[in-house]
Image (tube, rainbow, N blue to C red):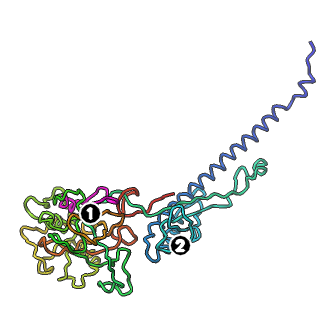
Amino acid sequence: MNRPVGLFQHQRGAIAIIVGISIAVLVGMIGLALDLGRMFVIKTELQNAADACALAAAKELDGNSGAKTRADAAGKTVGRLNLVNFQGESVIVEDANITYSDTLDGTYNRSISDASAKYVKCSLSKSDIGMLFMGVTGIGREKGFGSQEVGAYAIASLLPSQSPCVLPLGFCIDNSPPADCSEVGGNAGDSPDANGLCVGQWRTGKFGDAINGEFNWLDFENDGIEGNIKDQLITGYCGQITGETVSGQTGNLGESAAVAWNTRFGLYKSGNNPQYNGTPPASSDQTGYSYTSTNWPGMFGAYANFLAHRPPHDPYQGNAATGLSIGMPPYRSIAAALAVGTTDRRVVTVPVVNCAGWGPSHTTELSSNFACVLLLHPVADVNDDVYMEYRGIAGIPGSPCPAYGLPGGGGAEVPGLVQ
């Protein structure tokens, strides 16, 4: 039988052609996957830088003068700490990459005022990304796979943090603030903040039954029981705060609340009251050093001095120095308690409220405004004035009461991503 030799001869080399075409397609697919994967990695790196930039900038948006200048500096500094292109190049972050708006969906620009800048957007990009595989193939050139550009952006704002532990008192705003902080003992030229108060300013209130003072007690449990406030003076109130309507107390807290207050100064009383016995560890601050008009006549700005007394764990210096009349005994100032105390039990976060019209059976709705205050001295008598030093809005740069916790609660504001 005759074989069709000519037919087979005409088909020689067909396999090689098919293999060649397949290799080209496979190389193109591999190149596409590798180059697109590289672009995805660079975009992810850019997104990390944008997130960091926006979060750092948002922390500075306190509404005060210079907020945007500080936000620009923070955003650029933190954003540039990130690297792109497989961690081989620095991220470019300039002022033009950082814009602001008063609403999330508003127009972002750089001309908005410091007071109105509530949201910050960091927009970053990386251009001239060469295609390592697709750019050198005929397929890549035909499809336009030359140098590429990717970008990322993030928007952040200050948001209430998750359930902080605050003292059960409402720190009153000043509805008639001084024109200059020098009027309350501060530096000439300094202005009160958004609460009408100056950092370092002393404010006063009472434990006793009186409707006066510059802070008022809050009954978070809404049951009027002194025991709750006593416990919260020891551990703080750690529940939902922002948006809650709470009852106000006008004093009449009694001795047990005063005793609880004094534990923060390393002063403990015998009997069925909070006291230090070594187990569990002490709950006092690291210093019991106290400030009154007797030993701090200016009644302003004792915080730096307070910090200086922390390293040696200085105890309460006595009634002669402070002008108080703490009963000792039965109170005891225990050096061991101060030495192992928790650092910030006298530097505390408290809700800020408008105390205008405060009176019996008063209720108030709490906002996300929180103050940082220094507790100045223990309580000698429940009817004595109790002083605190205002250290500014909690959580803003420079505040000794750092905001903590993730966004999504009712605490002091922390920077959080919103887009």
Q: Amino acid at mark 2?
A: Ile
Q: Considering only vertical position in the picture, is 121 above or below 9?
A: below
* Dot 1 alpha-carbon crowd within 10 angstroms: few under 14, some 14 to 19, many 20 or more: some
- Taking depth in this image into account, of 178 and 309 the one nearest to the observer is 178
- The boundaries of the magenta stretch are 228-247
In the image, residue 236 lies at what x, y percent?
A: 25, 60
In the image, which disc is placed on residue 396?
none
Instruction: Kindly indicate the quadrant of the structure image that contains residue 244.
Output: bottom left
Q: Position of residue 202 (x, y in %)?
A: 26, 78
- Report if residue 376 lies within the magenta region: no
Q: Is residue 198 left or right of residue 380?
A: right
Query: Can I make out residue 237 in this image?
Result: yes
| Residues packed near mark 2 inside 10 Å, few (<14), some (14 to 19) or many (20 plus) | some
Q: Secondary structure at mark 1?
A: strand
Residue of label 2: 112
Is 290 situated above or below 248? below
> Which residue, given by chain and number where applicable, does mark 1 sit on?
363
Indicate yes or no whether the magenta region holds residue 243.
yes
Locate residue 235, reporting x and y percent. 23, 59
